[in-house]
Image: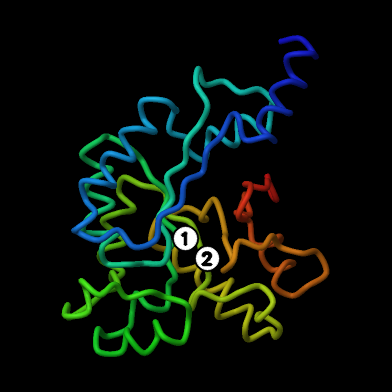
Amino acid sequence: MNTLTHDYQRTAFADGRFLRVVNWHNTPEGGRATLRAELVWYLERYHPVLPEDLDRFTDTGRWHLDRPGFIPVFYDSYLNNATVAAPVCDELGLTAWFFPTTAILSIPPAEQAALAEQHHFSILEEERGQPAFAMTWDDLAVIARRHVVAAHTATHAAAKDITTPEDVEREISTPIRLITELTGVVPPAFAFLFGTPPVVGTLAGDAVLGSGVRYATTNTSYLRIAD
């Protein structure tokens, strides 16, 4: 590959022409058909991207796929991600990326609404009568068999609110450790609430940068932060 093509690919990737990252949060049963149609639309136009595809590009600077890339991302441990999103992806043969908030995976259903009100979770009206709205560790283990599991703090925390060693342990170190134990690999990516990048010299930023996680996920990019 010549230098001109190499430079073009880097520019195109930075401009979003080689990768689309599409985020979902709640994926209710009532939206199953819509979600499936959206995923089919992307699959017809883009190539699903796995962590090793990102690694290959960031290692070589060369885009090896024959189409622009697509990463479908599901955030926040909603039960409907396990009952709707993951099965739809499985039906389509699509590997998605899931970013669970780990604290709620262990919380009894009766306590989930209170946590949601405190930590920027949304409970849909159509689901308020359900006994639970968050998935469990068992649900996540099933998802991890076919999909990528990344980290998104314990309680949906923003980087600016992680200011003590205790915060770092709770919101960064423990979620990464628990996901590693569940999946057998260090999560490939980490995202803070609001999509802010890790900032060097802050407790939160330095903890993510030194965690072994390879990508920091922001609202606009995947940043390679480790080998």
The dot on residue 35 is none
Q: Position of residue 207 (x, y in %)?
A: 69, 68
Left or right of 14, for residue 170:
left
Amino acid type of the residue tagged 1 in the rendering: Thr
* Element under disc 1: helix
Circle 2 crowding by C-alpha within 10 Å: few under 14, some 14–19, many from 20: many
Residue under label 2: 176
Q: Nearer the viewer, residue 87 or 24?
A: 24
The reply to whether discs 1 and 2 touch (Cβ–Cβ < 8 Å) is yes
| Residue displayed at 43% across by 72% down | 102
Splitting the image into 4 quarters, where does residue 96 fall?
top left
Residue, disc 1: 180
State the image coordinates of residue 67 (x, y, percent, origin top left).
Answer: 50, 21
Q: Which residue is drawn at 41% across and 66% down?
A: 76
Q: Is residue 39 left or right of residue 203?
A: left
Q: What element carries label 2?
A: helix
Residue at 47% across / 36% down in the picture?
A: 70
Question: Could you say where residue 222 lies in the image, as x and y percent from the top left?
Answer: 62, 47
* Quarter of the figure that contains the N terminus: top right
In terms of image quadrants, where is residue 30? bottom left
Amino acid at dot 2: Ile
Give x and y (percent) for residue 34.
26, 46
Quadrant of image for the C terminus: top right
